[in-house]
Amino acid sequence: MPGQRKILVTRSSMPPFEEYCDEIRELWDTHWLTNRGVKHRQLEDAIQEYLGVEHMTLFVNGHSALECVLETMELGRDGRDEVITTPFTFASTTHAIVRKGLRPVFCDIRPGDYTLDPSKIESLVTERTCAIVPVHVYGNVCDVDAIEEVAGRHGLKVVYDAAHAFGVERDGVGVGSFGDASMFSFHATKVFNTIEGGAVAHPDGVLSDRLAQWRNFGITGPEDVVYVGGNSKMNEFAAAMGICNLRHVDNEIAKRKAVAERYWELLGGVPGVKVCVPPSNVRHNYAYMPVVFDPAEFGATRDDVLDALAREGVGARKYFHPLVSDYACYAGRFDSSDTPVAREVAARVLTLPLYAGLALADVDRICGITLKVGA
Ligand code: T4K
């Protein structure tokens, strides 16, 4: 609509300007800007405590963190190079696997929460399988018990892509405590951000050393370089943003909760419209608002809704369409009909705007536009 303020799928959380200025002021005294400075160390400790995990290693972004953990676990070195994972995710999950010389094997997802379907994993395990990389997609907690039970029986590592799941807990246990490791993203679009950033949480102190060394060229001492590592260090300005944002994150999540509940109230129960309400034993972070439209029941397609919202200045997004297995860069390698649930969800899902500062009146307007399309 001409003159109307645009609403996008999300909007970065930022601390008060003065708070950030105060946080970075001392950098003008020290001139120490990166390479595990004071802010970096402070943030690493603070996030470790907030997430309640044993070890925490910060990275420049979530993708590097995922690549690094796959590499430092030495997956593929013994000839077992297959990794069971989901095609219903952002490019990063699969790209990290492929870029580390491993082969993704796509497993279908559950229709209820869109996470990996554990009942379909075992039939995909071969003598070449080395790991499972499930995704806590939209912040929905995977069936970690069932996944880790299959992994345990076959001697497989489990590395969770928890990019969307900052602060999520199941039965009071943070998601970063599950499996062999979990990767978090602190990108500008996430519930908690360091502008760009990410981390690996894990229970293994040895892995901790390796991750920290790998992210700094494999340097282990003034004259010692033991890994062919990369450079994935978080700088002090990003860490300072994280320190500030962490002070406000509980409040941000509470505001997101109010927005999410308004969506559920207005859209839940509408024929052909499926919203995803977390179970009562999960402390969710309300990272995304996925809504699945069944055109036969609703009377309109997901794309009809997307277009109608766009005409009114509302930028919803098709996270995650297309499936990774349908990307041009993987043409000829996979068949998305092997994962029919994921294919159907990808064809019908729309993620509606959700962020802490979104007014409930705007949610009402977005739902009104949405419901009019199907009427
Ligand atoms: N695994 C999973 C499952 C992931 O979803 C991701 C990232 C990763 C791994 C990798 O983590 P990182 O390496 O990124 O830490 C965005 C994000 O760039 C990406 O981090 C995220 N997933 C993905 C789901 O979404 P785009 O291409 O959709 O972003 P963009 O630029 O279209 O922004 C989306 C909306 O966010 C904009 O409409 C407005 C808002 N926005 C964006 C930026 C950049 C802001 O409010 N502030 C900003 O600075 O990928």
Image (cartoon, rainbow, N blue to C red):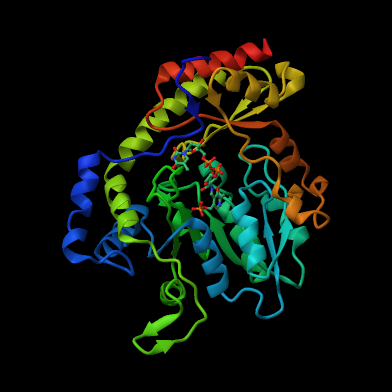
In the image, taking residue 137 as reference, residue 174 lies left or right, namely left
Write down the quadrant of residue 28 in the picture.
Answer: bottom left
Answer above or below: position of 30 versus 119. Answer: below
Residue at left offset 71%, top offset 74%: 80
Q: Closest to the observer: 278 or 160?
A: 160
Residue at left offset 68%, top offset 26%: 302
* Quarter of the picture holding the C terminus: top right
Q: Closest to the observer: 65 or 284?
A: 65
Residue at left offset 33%, top offset 42%: 249
Percent position (x, y) of residue 328?
75, 50
Q: Closest to the observer: 11 or 355?
A: 11
Answer above or below: position of 226 versus 254. Answer: below
Residue at left offset 62%, top offset 17%: 270
Seen from this angle, which residue lies furthest front?
2
Q: Is residue 179 among what the camera can see?
A: yes
Q: Is residue 134 among what the camera can see?
A: no
In the image, taking residue 27 as reference, residue 89 lies left or right, namely right
Answer above or below: position of 315 versus 106. Answer: above
In the image, taking residue 225 as reference, residue 92 lies left or right, namely right
In the image, taking residue 107 as reference, residue 23 lies left or right, namely left
Percent position (x, y) of residue 289?
53, 32
Write down the quadrant of residue 217 in the picture.
Answer: bottom left
